[in-house]
Image (cartoon, helix red, strand yellow):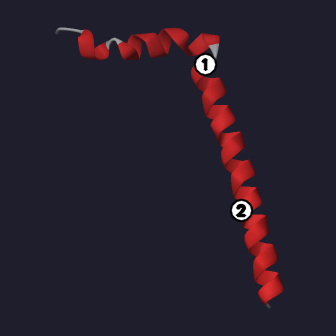
């Protein structure tokens, strides 16, 4: 049973790392995509607007 737990823990750690690396890459690509630049630039200026 101990070997099964160790194998499952190693798989979960590796799978989790890969999952979060892929998720980070997707978020980074979305944030840096040229089409989204205007939207993010506009959102960055919100605190400086006076209504």
At horizontal 80% and vertical 91% (from top left) the residue drawn is 1
At horizontal 48% and vertical 14% (from top left) the residue drawn is 39
Q: Marks 2 and 1: which is nearer the front?
A: 2
Q: Work out whether 36 lies above or below 6.
A: above
User: Residue 34, located in which quarter of the rendered image?
Assistant: top right
Q: Work out whether 21 lies above or below 29.
A: below
Indicate the secondary structure of the residue bearing disc 2: helix
Mark 2 Cα-neighbour bin, 10 Å: few <14, some 14–19, many ≥20: few
- Residue that badge 1 annotates: 32
At horizontal 25% and vertical 11% (from top left) the residue drawn is 48
Please report whichever mark, 2 or 1, sits nearer to the chain's N-terminal start.
2
Indicate the secondary structure of the residue bearing disc 1: helix
Q: From the viewer's perspective, tell me whether residue 24 is left or right of residue 42.
A: right
On the image, the x and y values in percent for residue 7 come to 81, 75
Q: Work out whether 47 lies above or below 29.
A: above
Residue sitting farthest toward the left = 51
Q: CA distance from mark 2 to mark 1?
A: 28 Å
- Residue that badge 2 annotates: 13
On the image, the x and y values in percent for residue 32 come to 61, 19
Give yes or no for contact between labels 2 and 1 (Cβ–Cβ under 8 Å): no
On the image, the x and y values in percent for residue 44 come to 38, 15
> In the rendering, which numbered label is found on residue 49?
none
At horizontal 67% and vertical 33% (from top left) the residue drawn is 26
Residue toward you, 4 or 23: 4
């Amino acid at each position: 049973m101990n070997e099964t737990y160790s194998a499952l823990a190693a798989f979960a750690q590796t799978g989790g790392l890969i999952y979060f690396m892929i998720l980070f890459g997707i978020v980074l690509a979305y944030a840096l995509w040229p089409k989204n630049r205007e939207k993010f630039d506009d959102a960055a200026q919100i605190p400086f607007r006076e209504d």
